[in-house]
Image (spheres, grey):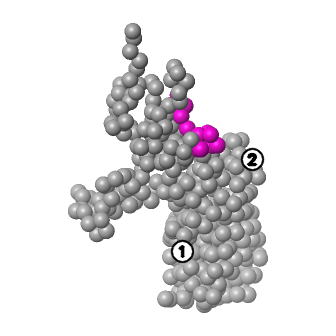
Amino acid sequence: MNPQPAAPRRADPPEPGDPELGERVPELGWPVGVVSERLGIAAPTLRSWDRRHGVGPSLRTSGNHRRYTELDIRRVQLMSRLTAQGVPAQSAADSVLAMDAASIAARLDGAVATAPGMVAAPGGGRPDATGASPGTALDAAAEAADAADLVESIVGAARALDARTMALLYRQVMRRRDVGRAWVEVFAPALRRVGELWREGLLGVQAEHLTSELLQSELRAVVRANRLRVAGQPVVLASADDEQHHLPLLALEAELARNGVASLFLGPRVPAEALVSTLRETRPRAVFLWASLARPQAEALWSDLDVVDWPLEVVIGGPGWADGIVVPEGPVVLTRVQDFDSAVRALVSSPGALTR
């Protein structure tokens, strides 16, 4: 009589990433009861995720019993994290199932701050060799993992054309972060990823449009919510004359509103003559110009600024601007910024800006 293969012992399941996993775990994998114990997720929930959303065990025993592999367990772990953040189960499942094993491992392994016994008490922990306290490093890792999860969730909602989930995710991001961090850590990476998938033919243009339109609505809501706080002479926000991308301008408008700075938003594709006319009529203290498409070094705009006879800071941002731009001699000062935070600092601290 040949003995049947022994099932894994319930008291000693291996940890994810165990180098001896292939030798220790039988091909049968892990039954739902063991996974429930290990992850602290009720067995009925695991069965529901499997039945309704396809996140479940992928192996079968010779007796046709289903078993979880380590990759299956990691999918469930990530699904649990996303749903705990408020992502609907179907959108969370779509995101998890679209990710490969390496991506899932990176998301989970990055969240070291959530591992039992590893979170330092506030202000506690001795500095490491770099001078940073363990808690600081763990918090940063956890925030990075959280941002990556949110990006994947937004992309998953875009795949499903799930406007409700996407709007909820946008609001959740801005509850946890200021607009600047939300843009840099989550919104811009999500937009880039959606754009990449569209160019690869893996997403329709309707998904890209939905992602952008809903984000515009949420950013404008921030501006409206802070309307009574803004004061002082407004700064002008505009894109170059053939530049269609203006979401960075909207994010900048929202962050300036949070800082009490008034702005005049002109949006995309502003002809040089219209921009100069606006400057002459409003005489702002600063103007921010965005360009993601390549621009010539010498263009009419720079020489047209010779009509400016008041102190004006021209702040340019985006990868499209050429090097070596020269503005007319006089009261115009040209400042080039490399990132979102630098743009905010330049516009908030410009001469005449509202001080608080």
Q: Residue 284, image x and y in percent?
A: 64, 85
Asked whether 12 or 86 is in front, the reply is: 12
Instruction: Identify residue for label 2.
Output: 204
Q: In the rendered structure, which amino acid carries the disc numbered 2?
A: Gly
> Left or right: where does residue 322 sit relative to residue 110?
right
Q: Secondary structure at mark 1?
A: helix
Q: Quadrant of the N terminus?
A: top left
* Quarter residue 58 falls in: top right
Mark earlier in primary sequence (2, 1): 2
* Quarter residue 55 falls in: top right
**Mark toward the viewer: 2 or 1:** 2
Residue range highlighted in magenta: 48-59
Q: Please tell me how crowded label 2 is: few (under 14), some (14-19), or many (20+) other residues with Cα within 10 Å.
A: some
Instruction: Identify residue for label 1.
Output: 344
Q: Residue 213, image x and y in percent?
A: 72, 63
Q: Is residue 212 visible?
A: no
Q: In the rendered structure, which amino acid carries the disc numbered 1?
A: Val
Q: Residue 241, image x and y in percent?
A: 74, 67
Q: Residue 53, image x and y in percent?
A: 63, 43
